[in-house]
Image (cartoon, grey):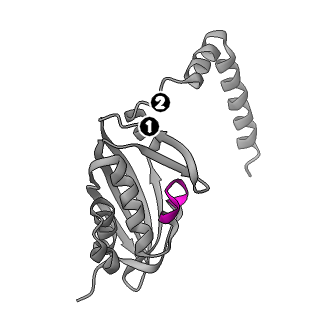
Amino acid sequence: MGITAEDAARGLFTVLATGDAALAARVVHPEFVNREAVVSPAASSIPGPAGVLASGAWLRAAFSDLAFPVSGVVHEGDQVWIRLRMVGRHTGPFVRYRDGRLDQAIPPTGVEIDTDQVHVLRLRDGKVLRHEAVRDDLTLFGQLGLVPPGPVARLVEEWRADGRAAEAADRIAESADRAAATAL
């Protein structure tokens, strides 16, 4: 009996958490593409199991005890939607990349992370061919201590105190009202 769509989806995240190359070969299509690899090391963009294994190594370098508890899976046709959490402890630098070069390095904080994610997977021949994600990065960065505070947080308070926030809210609401009124 072949691998099910749900098994392939769950297997992808087991590979990320464990680095299991044999499992990667069973659940990742040779032409696999990860749309989210743009913030990862260049090797994460390699097609197929190699890119998934590289992405897992990148995540495990930053987060010990990395796991992806699954809360739901929906499968229709060649698509799978998997809702899960990314959990672990931030014990190594979390390095983010842009165009293959260093964008940001977050020193280890030792904090526990726990963020919600939804992943959209496309399958071919019973294996994961394509990956896209909707992640709660704001919560992750908050847990890592990056937000707040920051310069923008101070500007938000200044706008609120001097009335610019209320003025902007009124202008935007009026604009939205005008746009809604144009509906047929």
Residue that carries the numbered disc 1 in the rendered image: 141
Q: At x 40% / y 40%, what residue is drawn? A: 140
Does residue 162 appear left or right of residue 1 in this picture?
Answer: right
Q: Nearer the viewer, residue 16 or 155?
A: 16
Q: Position of residue 58 (x, y in %)?
A: 40, 55
Q: Quadrant of the N terminus?
A: bottom left
Callout 2 amino acid: Val
Instruction: Tell me where residue 180 sits by quadrant.
Output: top right
Sequence-wise first label, 1 or 2: 1
Q: Position of residue 98 (x, y in %)?
A: 59, 51
Q: Are marks 1 and 2 in contact (CB under 8 Å)?
A: yes
Q: Main secondary structure of the magenta part?
A: helix
Does residue 100 appear left or right of residue 181 in this picture?
Answer: left
Residue that carries the numbered disc 2 in the rendered image: 147
Q: Position of residue 78 (x, y in %)?
A: 44, 78
Q: At x 30% / y 65%, what residue is drawn? A: 19
Q: Position of residue 86 (x, y in %)?
A: 33, 50
Q: Which residues are magenta?
A: 37-43
Callout 1 amino acid: Phe
**How many other residues sit within 10 Å of disc 1, few (<14), some (14-19) or many (≥20)?**
some
Q: At x 32% / y 63%, what residue is drawn? A: 13
